[in-house]
Structure formats: C-alpha cells, structure tokens
C-alpha cells in the first residue's frame, strides 16, 4: 500500500502558489511591455527629431549655398526667381516649408503664397551673426523643427534661408511605426505568458497544487511532527541516496551521524529495503531491536520516494525472550506431567495385574534417569534460570527426536558478567538454532557446554548439522537473513547484539563438528 498526496479542497484555500506566481508574472509582464513600448516610442520620437534636425539643416544650407540663390537675391524680384525653385526642392525633399527671407525678416518664398512679403516668425539673431542653428518653434504652420542659415555674397550676409518640418508630419512618421512596435510587443507578451504558463505548470507539479497558506501549514505541521513524534522517520526521494528528512529519533535509534544521511549510513539490513513496502519487520542493530515499516509515496501514479519509520522494541523483545523461556519451561513441565501421568498409569496397571516387582523396577528406573539429569545439572550449574532452561530444552529436543546433552566439562558458579536473563537469551537462541539445524535428521544431537575460563565466560553449542560457512554465518548475524523459511531469523542477530554489548567474540566452527562459540570477557575480580 502506497501513500498518496492530495491537495486541500477547502472553500477558503485560496489561489494556488503556482496561480499567484502566474498572475504576478502576467501583471508584471504587461506593465513592463507597456512601459517598454512607451519608451520605444519616445526613443523613436527622439531619433526622428535628431534626423529631422540634420535633414532640414542640410536642405537649408544647400539652398543658401546655391549660386542661383545669391543671384536671385540681388535681382529686382527675388520671389519670382526663388519661389518655383524652393517649392520643387520642398516637394522633392518632403519638408513642410523653405523660406528665403531678407535680413529684415521679409519673406521672399513660402509654402502658402499669401504669406510672401510678410515678416518671418522665429529666431534669426544667431543666423544674422553668421551661425547655422535649429530650433523648435510654433510658426504659421504650427509647431515645427526648423533650421536657419545665412546666405553670403562675399563676406556680406544678404539673406537668410529657413527649412522646417512640422511636428504633425514627424508624429505621422512615428505613428506609422507604432503597428510594428505593437506587433513585436504582442509577440513578446505572448511568449512571456507562454513561459509563465509553463512555469506555472512546473510549480503546480512541484507544489502539488497547494496554496501558500496550505504550504505554510504543511511546513508547520511537518516541523512539529518531526520534533514530537516518538518514532524514527527517514524519507528518501525517488532516485536519491541522500535522505530528504531525518528526525532526531531516527538519528538516535539508528546511531546516524550529524549532517546529511545517505542510505549507506543505515544499518546493513535497512540498506537492502530499497523501495519495498515493509510491514512490522524486526531488525537488529548493535544495541537495539527495531520494528520497521516502509511505504512508497506516490503522486498521480508517480513514485516520489519512500517513508521509513522505526520503533524501538528492545525492552519488549528482551521481555518476550524471557517469556519464551518461561513458556518453554511451562511446555517442558506440561510434557513431564503428561509423561508422569503415563508412567503412573502404567505402574497402576502393573500393580492391578499383580506384577509388583515389574512395577517397582519401571517406576524407579524412570525416576533414577530423570533425577540423575537434574542432579548433574544442579551440581554443575549454580544459575537456576539456566538449569531450568536446559531442562526445558532437553524435553523439547526429545519431542523433536533430537538428543540434547550437557558437556562433561560444563561448570558454572555464576552467570557473571551476564545477567540471568541475558544468559537465558544467549543460550536459548543458540540451542534453538542448533535444534532447527538438526531437526528431522536421523540421529540428530546437540551438545551444550557452559564454563568459566581464566578470563572469559565460554558458551559452546555443537550439533550434528552441516554447519555454516563464514559467508553464511556473517549473513546470519544480520537481521533479514535466515536459513529457515518459517520465522524471521532473529536468533543469531540477537546473540550478536548481546555479545557486542559485553565486548565479546562470536564465531562458527565446522570441525571437528558444527558449533557456535561465544566468549564473554571477565574482569579479574569476578568470581567464577
């Protein structure tokens, strides 16, 4: 089962983050394009003004420097000679007026003939001083850009020439370019809106269609949950080996380093989970027994990553181990009670048949064998919990057709440096693994040896099975591997955790027989 993320659908959720970004971009783009269009028009207007100044200056200077102009000015009727020429030049060059005037402003030529002979309106002082200049002036034809230049006859200024273009004509030239500007601006706006729409689509996919308020609430809840939850949480994005989220409890339970966490930093058994869905799976680390769950998170059928949760079951597992030991002892007592009932029934039947001697021999033989085992164990082992465990395991082995014996050199005054529950867990798991290894084999046997050496507590469990290679044994020490298919294979992993806790050593032997050996170091002052 995978988790699926769905956006909120409340009536007050507001516009999505992607929608707000798109709207803001659209408004900004429209404003920028309008401002840019206005600036472009102003720039074209300025360029047109500059070009007009150059144009009218060139025309005015050309007319003033023409020899025919100087000759016409000196004739009795300058208008008759100059008006046809200036009109042809005006029409050919596209300016609005060319005025040739006397130094006293009297017009000899003009576009509108009724204004010939009247004074020229505008500035002529600089031209009379010998300069050529341009100005923007509102004359008889309206606002215009005009140039004024002197006409020389030798060193003497005999006339002035002014050529100009009205603002209305310049505006027409600019307006003819506006459709092109609008077309370019429209195309730019369309492309910008298209890119904004693509960005909106990407944001929708990345934010899952959530509004800003929902994203803020999601972050606040996310942060609160990460710091308050009592389970370890590790989140991996799809295709990434570095964890996207690791809470404090996960770092504590999995003994993860500070800073970024990669999948390689996880315990070995958890690295193998990859993207599998896991439910309440037991995993053993160096110090803890953990219950692990993992889910795959999906969005619109697309996997986003995995969510791994971890719960600490160390104390519970230890209690369950003790409970299993007690349950084994109870089963052993139940089996002994059943056997005792059968033996008693046999003895009573023999008595009723009058076979008194046979009844006494049968009863005392069974009692003697049982008592010999109890006496031997209690004499060699002074830890009651271990004695009870071994007696129970002997009966369990008999029920499975396996002979379980205690080594002749077994001798234990105290479980130190282990506690009673720890030695029960350690020996119980090793014996269970050995019984599983020889189960359903002919003449199967298991031998348990527990004794103190000079500097260590030695526990050795041998069996008639084939044993494990070094590679198989190393894999068995990790949670998630088992040579059996009917349980989770935690036995050796739990043993390794306990041995590591006490700084001991754990190894497997295959010669002269299959065996698992544990050595727990002891301090010099510990009693045997």
Image (cartoon, rainbow, N blue to C red):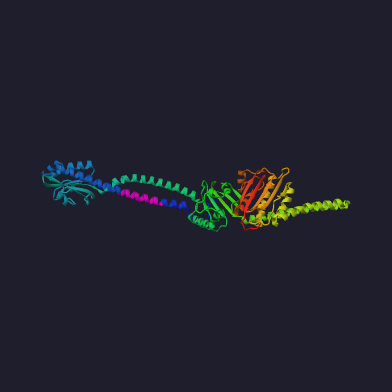
Quarter of the image with the C terminus in it? bottom right
Rendered residue at 33%/50% (across/down): 38
Task: Report if residue 5 lies within the magenta region.
Answer: no
Q: Residue furthest right?
A: 354
Q: Is residue 487 above or below residue 420?
A: above
- Residue nearest the observer in this picture, 344 or 464: 464
Residue found 34% across the figure and 46% down from its top: 181
Instruction: Locate residue 98, reporting x and y percent.
Output: 19, 45
Quarter of the figure with residue 79: top left
- Name the residue nearer the viewer: 96 or 495: 495
**Seen in the image, is 55 located left or right of residue 321?**
left
Q: On the picture, is 143 further left or further right than 296?
A: left
> Residue 48's x, y, as percent?
27, 46
Residue 37 part of the magenta segment: yes
Q: Is residue 385 visible?
A: yes
The residue segment tinted magenta is 27-42
Q: Position of residue 172 (x, y in %)?
A: 29, 46
Residue 11 visible in the snapshot? no
450 vs 38, left or right, is: right
Tell me how many marks there are: 0
């Amino acid at each position: 089962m995978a988790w699926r993320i769905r956006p909120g659908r409340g009536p007050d959720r507001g516009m999505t983050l992607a929608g707000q970004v798109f709207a803001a971009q659209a408004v900004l783009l429209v404003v920028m394009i309008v401002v840019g269009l206005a600036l472009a028009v102003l720039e074209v207007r300025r360029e047109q003004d500059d070009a007009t100044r150059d144009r009218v200056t060139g025309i005015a200077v050309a007319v003033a420097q023409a020899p025919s102009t100087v000759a016409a000015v000196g004739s009795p009727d300058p208008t008759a000679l100059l008006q046809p020429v200036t009109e042809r030049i005006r029409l050919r060059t596209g300016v609005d007026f060319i005025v040739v005037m006397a130094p006293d402003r009297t017009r000899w030529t003009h576009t509108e003939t009724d204004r010939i002979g009247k004074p020229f309106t505008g500035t002529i002082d600089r031209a009379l001083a010998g300069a050529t200049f341009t100005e923007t002036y509102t004359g008889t034809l309206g606002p215009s850009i005009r140039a004024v230049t002197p006409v020389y006859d030798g060193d003497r200024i005999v006339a002035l020439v002014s050529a100009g273009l009205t603002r209305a004509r310049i505006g027409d030239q600019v307006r003819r370019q506006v459709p092109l500007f609008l077309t370019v601006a429209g195309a730019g706006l369309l492309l910008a809106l298209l890119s904004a729409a693509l960005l909106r689509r990407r944001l929708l996919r990345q934010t899952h269609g959530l509004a800003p308020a929902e994203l803020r609430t999601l972050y606040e809840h996310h942060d609160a949950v990460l710091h308050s939850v009592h389970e370890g949480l590790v989140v991996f994005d799809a295709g990434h080996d570095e964890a996207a989220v690791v809470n404090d409890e996960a770092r504590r339970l999995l003994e993860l380093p500070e800073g970024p966490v990669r999948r390689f930093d996880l315990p070995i058994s958890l690295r193998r989970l990859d993207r599998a869905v896991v439910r309440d799976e037991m995993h053993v680390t160096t110090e803890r027994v953990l219950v692990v769950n993992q889910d795959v998170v999906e969005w619109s059928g697309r996997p986003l990553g995995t969510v791994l949760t971890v719960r600490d079951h160390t104390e519970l597992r230890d209690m369950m181990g003790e409970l299993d030991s007690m349950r084994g002892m109870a089963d052993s007592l139940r089996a002994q009670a059943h056997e005792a009932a059968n033996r008693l029934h046999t003895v009573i039947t023999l008595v009723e048949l009058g076979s008194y001697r046979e009844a006494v021999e049968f009863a005392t033989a069974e009692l003697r064998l049982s008592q010999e085992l109890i006496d031997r164990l209690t004499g060699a082992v002074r830890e009651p919990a271990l004695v009870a465990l071994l007696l129970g395991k002997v009966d369990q082995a008999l029920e499975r057709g396996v002979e379980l014996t205690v080594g002749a050199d077994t001798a234990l005054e105290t479980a130190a440096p282990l506690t009673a529950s720890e030695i029960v867990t350690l020996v119980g798991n090793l014996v269970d693994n050995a019984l599983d290894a020889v189960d359903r084999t002919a003449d199967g046997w298991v031998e348990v040896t527990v004794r103190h050496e000079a500097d260590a507590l030695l526990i050795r469990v041998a069996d008639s099975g084939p044993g494990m290679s070094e590679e198989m044994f190393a894999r068995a020490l990790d949670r998630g591997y088992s040579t059996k298919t009917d349980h989770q294979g935690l036995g050796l992993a739990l043993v390794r955790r306990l041995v590591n806790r006490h700084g001991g050593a754990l190894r497997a032997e295959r010669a002269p027989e299959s065996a698992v050996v544990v050595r727990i170091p002891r301090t010099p002052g510990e009693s045997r």
